[in-house]
Image (tube, helix red, strand yellow):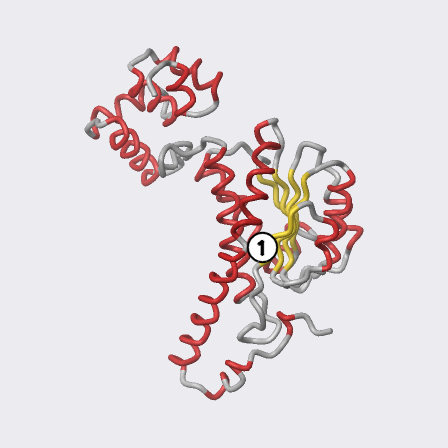
Amino acid sequence: MIRPTEQRNPRTVHIDQWPSVRVVEALLAEDATAIAAAMVAAPALADAVDRASARIADGGRVHYFGAGASGRLAVLDATEATPTFGTPPGFFTPHFPGGAAAFADSSLDFEDAEPAGYDDAAPVGPGDVAVGLTASGTTPYVAGALRRAGAAGALTVLVACNADPPLAMLADVTVVADTGPEAIAGSTRLKAGTATKVLLNAFSTALMVRAGRTYSNLMVNLVATNDKLHDRAVGIVGTVAGLGPGESAAVLGRCDGDVPLALTHALSGRTVAESRRALTDSGSVRAALALLGSS
């Protein structure tokens, strides 16, 4: 049976004869259906977030396993988590078959290497979360990884774009965005890639929200590695605490640039040392403020 993502799309059969504007419009219209398909998967994704949150709260980490476009999107999501949410190195760990060389060179294709997936899952422990990403729901590399992670006792999650993914048997939670035939048959970097990206964005972001790494809708655990992010940090402190830019910068300075500490200090009126202890004991700005009686 031909996988849905490999089938020909009747809406784009004549795409090679169209003017550019029609080609672009058709591609964007197909992408819009991918977002709708991802929305259908929201309840399953929320289940994955809730179950993963329990593991994370006990010190677990998240491992992504994917090949091709899916695996490259996983690397993007994992590497962006640190500047956005201040996650420590390895909190989100992407695994790609063949490693860095294959990631950069698509001619090095180890998608079918199930033993490689099994080997790459060696670091996954019983308190961790293993997320397998495969548009078809059949990728052998992902199968090997989920099989080993499951045997280790980890929470296993499958994200696929096939309505009936065979690898669902290896997952505790299956998240399906049924994107159907691609505009260019088999090119899962298109609709399937779009759905996979938004599902990953939603998963990692919701997980970090649940972990208290935002305050309201502000990325208070950001890592200010450049001037733009430093200005954002000053703006966050000012917005939340009702301070001007100069006052916000001064508070951040007293707190060594630590935005959650600066917010706890400014909102509670306690000393920096007291605020730091409350954050260490509670883990988030809201919880620290509650501990200090300032929520």
Q: Residue 126, located in which quarter of the rendered image?
A: top right
Which residue lies at the image location 73% right of the left edge and 54% below the top edge?
Answer: 141
**Residue 44 % position (x, y):** 57, 49
Q: Quick one: 108 or 271, which is closer to the camera? A: 271
Up-down relation of residue 1 to residue 61 (above or below)? below
Q: Amino acid at mark 1?
A: Arg
Q: How many marks?
A: 1
**Residue 176 % position (x, y):** 60, 57
Q: Secondary structure under badge 1? A: helix
Which residue lies at the image location 74% right of the left edge and 49% below the top edge?
Answer: 170
Q: Residue 122, located in which quarter of the rendered image?
A: top right
Which residue lies at the image location 47% right of the left edge and 42% below the top edge?
Answer: 205
Q: Which residue is mark 1?
A: 72
Outermost residue, right direction? 115
The quadrant of the rendering that contains the N terminus is bottom right
User: Callout 1: few (<14), some (14-19), or many (20+) C-alpha neighbours within 10 Å?
Assistant: many
Query: In the image, is 273 to the left or to the right of 113?
Result: left
**Residue 294 % position (x, y):** 33, 17
